[in-house]
Image (cartoon, grey):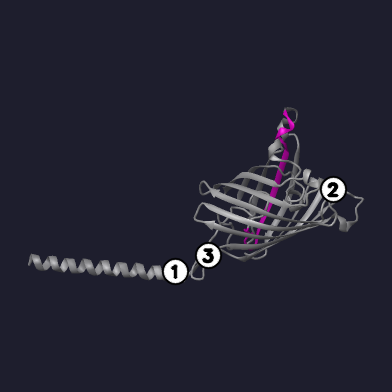
Amino acid sequence: MKMLRLALLLMCSSAVAYAQDDLLNQLSKQDSAQKIPVDATFKSTRVVNGHSVETMKKKHMDFRISHRFGRLNSGAYNFFGLDQATMRMGFEYGLTDNFMIGVGRSTSQKAYDFLGKYKVLKQSTGARSVPVSVTLFGSMAIATVNKELEFQDKLTYTAQVLIARKFGERLSLQLSPTFLHRNHPDVLGDENTLLAVGIGGRFKLSKRVSLNGEYFYTAREKNTVTARYYDSMSFGVDIETGGHVFQLHFTNSLGMIEKQFIGETAGTWGKGDIHYGFNLSRTFSFDKKNKRQPAN
């Protein structure tokens, strides 16, 4: 009888193990047959200065205040740049989950900017996986500080293709080919049209804190202008607290729109022309079904 009970017990155990394995295999097949989107490639619509592939969710508005202080090498008399400040205030709104519009105003050059972003592809895993996210970005800026210029000469246009991939839970990288056209460059002899490429990244330290960095290489012909303008490079920390995102960073760019930090960065890290700055982002929901944008 003992041998019979032992045999029955072994048979039942084998049947249960087989059933569990079969169930796990079925679940695995179902997961691989589904297309699972990859969310939160970046914590915000910005990497640092430049835009990320992220867009605002439908019926969500982002109120954003950005500050850049003076240069750290300006000395103790200017409190290492903190006595001087440049700011931009902007609003961005999601018309759909993949399409957003925005408007902003900068104290630098008394510039107004208007922007739109459309997410063409979203990274996903599983069936028919997509390896990267792709977002199209376009903006127009109007620098109103020079009243002597005609209106059309105050305009600048920017077009970008933002391509990003999230590698696991911690690392995200982005490539940003850029086309920038100024109807009237601020410096005589500078080119109207500039081509640039940006490289950006994010590394998560925790669920709510990440390290961010970006670099924009701007192609210019070798002339006197190249000695005046430099490539933009920025590093910072993102801190997410509920509906707020704080971005604290150091950059050699004073301007906060593409016209300024891609085309007109006048400082260099090598000489200590570094600005401390921050972005403060607050998201508001107008969607009664989902009052809060999910944390990244």
Is the N terminus in the top left, top right, bottom left or bottom right quadrant?
A: bottom left
Give the SS element for disc 2. Answer: loop
In the picture provided, is 206 more to the left or to the right than 225? left
Tell me the residue that label 3 is attached to: 124
Q: Is residue 89 above or below residue 114?
A: above
In the picture provided, is 168 more to the left or to the right than 223? left
Magenta region, residue range: 53-75
Q: Say which mark, if any, is on residue 273.
A: none
Question: x%, y% of residue 264?
Answer: 77, 48
Q: Is residue 242 visible?
A: no
Classed neighbour count for the residue bearing mark 2: other residues with Cα under 10 Å, few (<14), some (14–19), many (≥20): few
Choose between 155 and 64: the one closer to the eye: 155
Q: CA distance from mark 2 to mark 1?
A: 56 Å
Q: Look at 57% across and 62% down and name the residue there.
A: 132
Classed neighbour count for the residue bearing mark 1: other residues with Cα under 10 Å, few (<14), some (14–19), many (≥20): some
Of labels 2 and 1, earlier in sequence is 1
Q: Is residue 261 above or below residue 155?
A: above
Q: Say which mark, if any, is on residue 187.
A: 2
Q: Say which mark, if any, is on residue 32.
A: 1
In the picture provided, is 171 more to the left or to the right than 280? left
Of labels 3 and 1, earlier in sequence is 1
Q: Look at 63% across and 56% down and name the residue there.
A: 175
Q: Amino acid at mark 3?
A: Ser
Q: Look at 84% across and 57% down and name the residue there.
A: 183
**Magenta span includes 68:** yes
In the picture provided, is 281 more to the left or to the right than 152? left
Q: Amino acid at mark 2?
A: Val
